[in-house]
Image (spheres, helix red, strand yellow):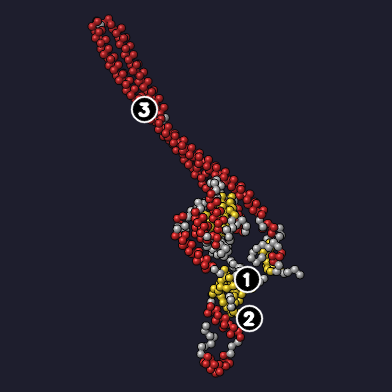
Amino acid sequence: MTDLFTENQAEQEEVIKASPAQNILTVSEVSNSLRMLIEREFGYVAVEGEVSGFKAAASGHIYFDLKDKTNLIKSVVWRSAAAGLKYRPKDGDQVVLYGMLTAYGPRSNYQLIVKRIEPAGAGVLMQRFEELKRQLASEGLFDRGRKRSIPYLPRRIGVVTSPTGAVIEDIKHRIEDRFPTHIQLAEVLVQGVGAKEQIAEAIETLNALPENTRPEVIIVARGGGSMEDLWAFNEEVVVRAVAASNIPVISAVGHETDITLCDYAADMRAPTPTAAAELALPVKRELCEKLNSIKSRLEQSAIGEVRALKKHVILFKMALPDPQSHLAQAQFKLEDMRNNINRVIHSNINTTCNKFTIKKQFFNSKNIRNYFDYKIGRYEQLSTRFFAGKALIGETRSLLNKHHHSMQQSLYRKHERDLQLLSHMNTRLDCINLLLKRVGSMHEQLVEKEKLLKSYSPLGPLERGYVIVQDTAGVVVRHAQQVADGEVTLRFDDGTRQAKLSKDK
């Protein structure tokens, strides 16, 4: 290590003798120079050793020694860093400390300002973690193509976690707040001996349930902790169970910065168990608002479509003539032609008979015979024209009957299409009414849940003059011995105040 002064001792002595007043240092100058030298030379370090004399002071700071077989280093964790420690050691624990090496002048010693503490051996665990991660990734267990989407509104949610602790309570409360639904809790150990087997078995058991009782999504959850605490969720049997699950899985192990192999194998990773509940369910209030908007649009669309269909039906009726009317007109015309022909024939016969009666004395038998031959020929001509007209009328009637049948078929098909369209619209209206009834029922349930939530709210007593006492970590104080001597936060209805409690005398 570089000396404080120049390396040449002889030159140092000559400089001191030549101007002794200018080279006299104070104690503080020496102490500060040593501190800056240590901090500059070492900087941020990681030191492994055994914890000794562990003490958590009332101020929130932590003091202890880190030693090996021959030496020790004074170590301190300031209150700001102590609140964020994931692992708190005890005397005799083998740990790795990460922090800044510095000197403390008032006591003339050096110490380690600790920022993070990990159990010794975390490096070995990390190596095992990376090896297993590479192996499972090579088998395709972490491929994005295997990921499935989470159901939008599951009716049942399976939760694999410990039955005690804050994790399951946080998940239950968040589900109740967002959209109350059925929770199937699979109680397991989340660390220690037997934890990995229980977790894997719980996932397989939920998958093996009958379809009508099987959850639609599984949340695998655990609170934060060290790498050793979370190691059960890095075990191969657990990771393979998550990857083989037929039900989509949300992994919510540890805090946001904690990563486990379950996170890679799951269909979705949540930074915290509370966030997993938020990802599994939508907010009921927002969903009701969306359904009301869809309901309004469906009603307007259905009303507009029904009006348009009615208008088309009216226009079709107005544009299409009545075939019965056409047929009646043709029949009337045919009867009129028949009557005219009969009238003409009878008129000619009567006229001829009258002429013959009046003038028969003036005609001889030959003339009469010729006259009748002429009239018979004329009658035959008229008869021929009559039957020709009758045949034409028959053809016209056949053509009218053919057109009448075709028009009836066309009208029948159009009528069937209109009936199908009206039936489809009635079905859509029934769906809309069912959806409206469902939305109304959901709204009533939401109102009841909101009343229940207000009745259980901890803010109610504040309005009546009560006070909530919290310690420095924000935990509600229920017993006086929790804060025998320390700072607390008093929460009133209109704000908070800090207070310091003293011991009873």
Instruction: Relative to 473, say whether 1 is above or below.
Output: below
Q: What residue is pinned by disc 1?
A: 91
Q: In the displayed structure, does residue 429 sit left or right of residue 82?
A: left
Residue that label 2 marks = 107
Q: Which residue sits at x=49%, y=40%?
A: 425
Q: The C terminus is located in which quarter?
A: bottom right
Q: CA distance from mark 3 to mark 2?
A: 121 Å
Question: Does 21 appear above or below 479?
Answer: below
Q: Residue 224, position in %: x, y?
A: 58, 62
Instruction: Say which amino acid is labelled 3.
Output: Lys
Viewer-nearest of discs 3 and 2: 2
Residue 131 place in picture, x, y as percent: 48, 64
User: Which label's residue is closer to the chain start, 3 or 1?
Assistant: 1
Q: Position of residue 366 (x, y in %)?
A: 23, 6
In three-dimensional space, the C-alpha distance between marks 1 and 2, rounded to whole angstroms, equals: 24 Å
Q: In this rendering, would 304 be left or right of 482? A: left
Mark-to-mark CA distance, 3 and 1:
109 Å
Q: Residue furthest bottom?
A: 18
